[in-house]
Amino acid sequence: MASTNYRTGRVIGLASTAALGGFLFGFDSAVINGAASAIKSTFALSSFALGLVVSIALIGSAIGAWFAGYLAERFGRRRVMLVAAALFLLSAFGQAFPLGIYDLCFWRLVGGAGIGVASVMAPMYIAEIAPAQLRGRMGSLQQFAIVIGIFSTGLTNYLILSAAGGNSLNEWLFGIPAWRWMFLTMVIPALIYGYFAWRLPESPRYLVEIGKYDEATAVLSQIYTDDVSARVEDIRVSMQGEHKPRMSDLRGKRFGLLPLVWIGIILSSLQQFVGINAVFYYSNTIWEAVGFSEDQAFQTSLITTGVNVAFTVVAIALVDRVGRKPLLLVGSFGMVAMLGTLTYVFGTAPISSDGQPVLTDGPDIVALLAFNIYVAFFAATWGPVIWVLLGEMFPNRIRAAALAVAAAAQWVANFLVSTAFPPLAEISLGLAYSIFTIFALLSIPFVIRHVRETKGVELEDMAILERPL
């Protein structure tokens, strides 16, 4: 029952507000990069301990994502967004002024929980308020906000560092060291997110679920220009059941879960196993290891971040025109080609005395191009499209719980890649990238066989797309 009678400006406003959680998601996950060396020095940490401080936020993200679905069903989407804003705000102060290393780890965990909650709530809310014809583009705003958040963190950290004389341990405003200000800057977007989330209308799907049909009608009337009574009835019918949605509804006869839930989990995991966060967490380290100077490595990483932002815009333009499945396939083939190239270049390069490949004139250009083209393929396809699919692919009756499980799986996969990459890279960068290549290759038959196109399908009709594994 698709319609073109919707208020585009209102939809964009609602979706953009929900996507602010994605901005904080990107901002908080990347802010540690600028402060890492100062934290290591301030608390006299070993490399292993510093790695734990960095990665513990991912554990918090998995926990936050896991419980977000339950909280969204119990208290509503809007209230849980406010919880995420509060977690971001508290963690900003906690990470800026920790009493010790264990205290810092705790606040990193709290901030990670905020990231996890936001990673579930933004795609869920956007999918539930956006008309089918706009849902892909609106859902892509989540990934766009994430990459803008990452870029903003890098820029903010750089400006603070420059103002403090080039050393994050130096004192800046009010005698507070620069690295602490890097965390404090998160207070501003957290407050903005909280204010706009407080003003958001509740999801009409949730309102129908709790029997507030008049309120659901009022919200839908803000979005659509025609009579919405039939839409409210469609939502009510799609959510009929003997009880409120719960985690037990995800159980299936094969492998313990419904096939569609497994598809969501595997898609989430594949998005991480192609190695994208090894790029964004360790890109400077990679380029310095193969012979780039520190300044060259920094410039190269900024280029890569810019490519990520630019091609996310491409995804927003294409996702509702081309469709989800074709974009995923194009991305998979492109990533296989570029990751395979990187595997060959790193694997055949001469080895230095410290065991790292050395790229000379020619191979260094090839590696640089392949690296950024790989990011471009990911940013235009798997980056945003997975968030779009997770927000829309599940039927109304299981969406909150299924999305929470799939998002939690994504954070666990992120943790595995982030912790496994450094030791793999020490053995061989070629080995690390060959593993990423294999997962990108495996994604092709999986998408062909198990992903159903959702372009233009109303959320109330998603149940017809369920299929066995």
Image (cartoon, helix red, strand yellow):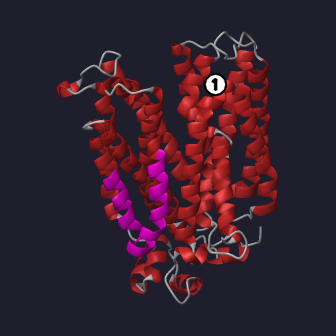
- Neighbourhood count class around disc 1 (C-alpha, 10 Å): few under 14, some 14–19, many 20 upward: some
Residue situated in front as seen by the camera: 343 or 391:
343
Q: Main secondary structure of the magenta part?
A: helix
Region of the chain picked out in magenta, as a range: 58-87
| SS category of the residue bearing label 1 | helix
Is residue 11 something that shows in the picture?
Answer: no
The residue carrying mark 1 is 426
> Residue 111 appears at what percent x and percent y?
38, 48
Residue situated in front as seen by the camera: 385 or 405:
405
Judged from this view, the residue extending furthest toward the bottom is 242
Q: Specify whether residue 340 is painted magenta.
A: no
Say what amino acid the circle numbered 1 marks. Answer: Glu
Residue 447 is drawn in which quadrant? bottom right
**Quadrant into which the N terminus falls:** bottom right
The correct choice, above or below, for 119 with respect to 23 in the image is below
Q: Specify whether residue 74 is painted magenta.
A: yes
The correct choice, above or below, for 375 with respect to 413 in the image is above
> Residue 134 appears at what percent x and percent y?
59, 62
Relative to residue 202, is residue 103 drawn left or right?
Answer: left
The correct choice, above or below, for 288 with respect to 421 in the image is above
